Amino acid sequence: MGVKKTLSFRQKAKLYSKYSLLGKEELLKRLKLITEVLRETYGVNQAELVGLADSSTVVPLTVFCEKLSPLESVVKFLHENRNKSFSEISKLINRSYRTVWGAYEASLKKNKKRFEPEQTKYVFPTEILASRRLSVLETICLYIKDNYGLSYKRIASLIKRDERTVWTAVNRARTKLRKKKRKIKRKK
């Protein structure tokens, strides 16, 4: 997408004073319009927009390794590279403190080195993990497939899993979500 330019304090203050007078609805309308222009004119996808919004809660796909489970990789990255406490991580991904702490401890037994993730445009927001309907792997694979449109083979190479595992995770996720929609329709 290009080089990210950070705004100076003065520029931020000027923008804040200009837009803080607008109501929430008006700001959301303008943001939606800007988002549409970025998508249609510049080909910016949803995942790139999420990455711009708050990089402290975005995880690059380069943190995954064969040794660690997806949850262990995410927790290790957030704790060591983003300096998040276990309590903060547990709130972000909707898991108990014990689960987060346990995942981190297990990750240390398998991989003591700190992650040094490579720069990548493929990221996902931690908020997608808050829904407990899908497993961590299913959630991440489905998000990548839907938002980046990558092949199963490419996803597999990014998250260091077998291509068949990725295919299975995406299809299980879609099946679970379809079943959930059917249940909602039946209730109506």
Image: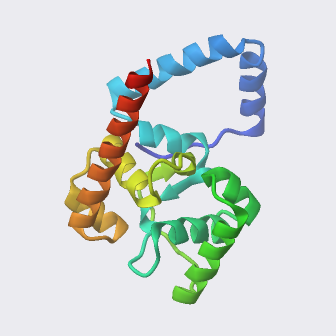
Residue at 48 percent across and 16 percent down: it is: 33
Q: Is residue 84 visible?
A: no
Q: Hey, which quadrant is residue 53 in on the image?
A: top right
Vertical order, 168 against 63 (above or below): above
Return the residue nearer the eye: 67 or 63.
67
Q: Is residue 27 found left or right of 123 in the rendered image?
A: right
Return the residue nearer the eye: 134 or 48.
134
Residue 104 place in picture, x, y as percent = 62, 75
Return the residue nearer the eye: 88 or 181.
181
Vertical order, 21 against 38 (above or below): above
Q: Hey, which quadrant is residue 78 in on the image?
A: bottom right
Residue at 72 percent across and 12 percent down: it is: 23
Q: Is residue 99 found left or right of 62 in the rendered image?
A: right
Vertical order, 186 against 109 (above or below): above
Residue 132 place in picture, x, y as percent = 53, 50
Residue 128 place in picture, x, y as percent = 51, 46
Vertical order, 53 against 94 (above or below): above
Residue at 38 percent across and 78 percent down: it is: 66
Residue at 52 percent across and 66 percent down: it is: 71
Is the image coloured rainbow, by chain, by secondary structure, or in one colour? rainbow
Q: Is residue 162 found left or right of 50 in the rendered image?
A: left
